[in-house]
Image (cartoon, rainbow, N blue to C red):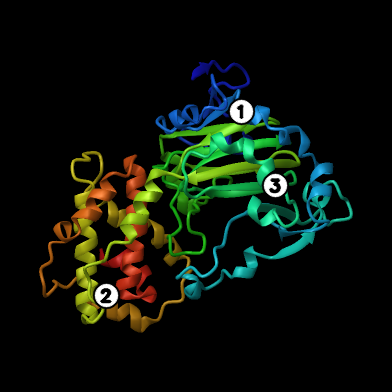
Amino acid sequence: ITTTTTADPHNRNAATVPWLASQSLAAAVVYAGERRLSDPLATSEYHALTQQDQPLILRNTAADQWPAMHLWTEEYLSSALPPELPVYVQSDPRFITFHDNRPLEPLLATKRWEDFNTKHNATVSMLLGRDTSSSQADYLYFSADRRLLKPFYEDIEAATEPLKPFLLTETGLQVNLWLGRRGIVTHTHYDASYNFFLQLHGSKRFVLLPPDAPVLPFPCLHPHMGHAQVDLQNISAKHASFKKWTGTIVVAELNRGDVLYLPPYWWHHVETLDASISVNAWTDAPAYTLLEAIYELPIPLEGDWPFAELASQTRVMLLELSYAIMKGETQVPRDWLISSLRDRYAGLMADKEFNLRKKDVTQLLAVCKQRPEQEILFDQVMSKGVSLFRQIQPVAVRMLCFANYAEHVMHAAVGIKAVPLFATECL
């Protein structure tokens, strides 16, 4: 793999992202680096990229030899796909995923499934903003796994076979088609997968942040799981501390034929700059595989224990494991889990996001910090889990994944109605 030098306009400033420049951020803003691959069909070339954990725009890739790069135009897709597609529609250009059946959904005071998941039928031309008969006040957005399109586009799997070098592992394989008009924004979120994003037509801008960026993840039990509470385009007063973060924001502007490698767990905010047709390829990253093994391990808590014992043992277990998985990581504060979970929930609690009963709150606060009746050496009982967590790299991803795990443990042990208070008051 050889590195190409980047020249103007790919220099170290954010002049081409006015809304970013206007936020008065302490973070450095740089353009994504570029790489030219020596052998575009060798999977080993793509595997080598993953060792650096940095987003890169790739040149001389397998996509250059893919006929769809030229064939999949608006006209072609209009004829290959159904006359109308089920698409998301809303008046707000910012799309944020609202996952169904997440445990916290019944507690939400204001947000509802239909607020984020209204669907209409639309043509490809309407999706791309070419058909003026559709309401220009509405933003339409379409994304679908190629397997869902197979009944309409019989040869789609064969048509995407040239993307095979981008598929780095045997599990989690998914290839998606994306269509959208100018102005659509995908809210800041992360994926737990290797991601190669191909821009076929039009242009998109990715604003990328590393896993340790303090963008405040929504709780993983929340329907907005995997998304940031901080709105990068309009940072609110309650999230003003983000402006003091001194890390690095990476900007990647993709045009026709560009390929972006996006590492797992990197936060990304995506703008559609022009009517856009894109395809991406996902496969499972090592952290995801490790987490599958971790979640299969039994939790050493008993369902028939009194509530007070369950609550206090859960607290001790999570704190002991958080120390064990970070042992030797001198840059990580000992109370990192407490602050992580509190940050996830505190703002939502202040905004009265959850409907909580006073009875549940009083009961939990009365018992959660009591001393457990039994002494359990959780770091020893769960030594296998500790070992698996310690294999997750980088450390910021390990922290994110353990905080997610802690939420699931709280849910199983004390019940979903107690989780928001447990996260903010009991650790």
For residue 39, say whether it is visible: yes
Q: Are marks 2 and 3 in contact (CB under 8 Å)?
A: no
Callout 1: few (<14), some (14-19), or many (20+) C-alpha neighbours within 10 Å? few
Whole-number angstrom distance, CA of label 2 to CA of label 3: 55 Å
Callout 2: few (<14), some (14-19), or many (20+) C-alpha neighbours within 10 Å? some
Q: Earlier in the sequence, mark 2 or mark 3?
A: 3
Number of callouts? 3
Q: Residue at x 57, y 58 (%)?
A: 97
Q: Foreground: 242 or 47?
A: 47
Query: Quick check: 289 left or right of 263?
Result: left
Whole-number angstrom distance, CA of label 1 to CA of label 2: 50 Å
Residue under pointer 1: 15
Q: Amino acid at mark 1?
A: Ala
Q: Earlier in the sequence, mark 1 or mark 2?
A: 1
Above or below residue 39? Residue 122 is below
For residue 340, say whether it is visible: no
Query: Quick check: 349 left or right of 112?
Result: left
Q: Are marks 1 and 2 in contact (CB under 8 Å)?
A: no
Above or below residue 116? Residue 273 is above
Q: Amino acid at mark 3?
A: Ile
Q: Are marks 3 and 1 in contact (CB under 8 Å)?
A: no
Q: Which mark is residue 365?
A: 2
Q: Which mark is residue 156?
A: 3
Query: Quick check: 241 left or right of 198?
Result: left
